[in-house]
Image: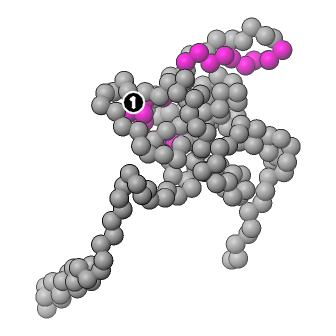
Amino acid sequence: MAYGLGIVKGFGVTLKNFLRPPFTEEYPEQQHPTLGRFRGYEFVWYEERCTGCASCAKYCPLGTIRIVTKPTPDPALGHKYFVEVFDVDTGRCMFCGLCVEACPYDALFMGSHFERASYSRPGMVVTKEELVRAEKKPSLYYRPHLEAAHYDRKTHLEPAPAGRDFQGRWSEGKPYPQAPEEPR
């Protein structure tokens, strides 16, 4: 009896979907919107925020981030390093986001795009020059202060409001916007 019931249920699902109009997106012309915390196939890097501490490279489980630094010649800058090389091998990256979580200065964000294809492995390495020239539209992954401020990923994010400090303020001194509390 249960054998026939499964077949009837399966035909019911088939019939329901057969009568429904097709759902097709014409991909390059129409793009399905991604969610705010989508970890895309790119990275957003703010060079002026990066101190060269290499925390992102240390926490990467696959070692896909390569950083080469040298000390800055200006002692007024403190212990900041000049980043000579900042390469991310997206061909090996599993987009776990641990590098973004490890960055103490909010210099590294996950991106929100997914269209980066290449026919060769060297073409999948994102260099420092590409990261500097890239559009700054970060994902909201691991950024609750941006999500609470209802940041729209379609707009360019300047480096000043991108960061957080550890006193609970924005980088420019404004307090964190508070998200409305959900009823329990």
Q: Residue at x 66, y 16 (%)?
A: 82
Q: Residue at x 57, y 48 (%)?
A: 139
In the image, is 54 to the left or to the right of 96?
right
Q: Check disc 1 and report the residue beneath it.
A: 124
Furthest residue to the right?
Answer: 173
- Quarter the C terminus occupies: bottom right
Rendering coords of residue 14 (x, y %): 21, 79
Q: Residue at x 64, y 54 (%)?
A: 152
The answer to which quarter of the image holds residue 118 is: top left
Q: Nearer the viewer, residue 106 or 31?
A: 31
Q: Amino acid at mark 1?
A: Met
Rendering coords of residue 133 (x, y %): 57, 29
| 82 w.r.t. 174: above or below | above
In the image, is 124 to the left or to the right of 100?
left
Rendering coords of residue 88 (x, y %): 48, 29
How many numbered marks appear?
Answer: 1
Residue 107, magenta (yes or no): no
- Quarter the N terminus occupies: bottom left
Q: Is residue 152 visible?
A: yes
Q: Is residue 56 visible?
A: no
Q: Residue at x 52, y 27 (%)?
A: 130
Magenta residues span: 76-100
Q: Residues within 10 Å of mark 1 (few under 14, many from 20)?
A: some
Rendering coords of residue 95 (x, y %): 46, 42
| 121 w.r.t. 17: above or below | above
Residue 88, magenta (yes or no): yes
Q: Secondary structure at mark 1?
A: helix
| 182 w.r.t. 119: above or below | below
Q: Nearer the viewer, residue 1 or 162?
A: 162
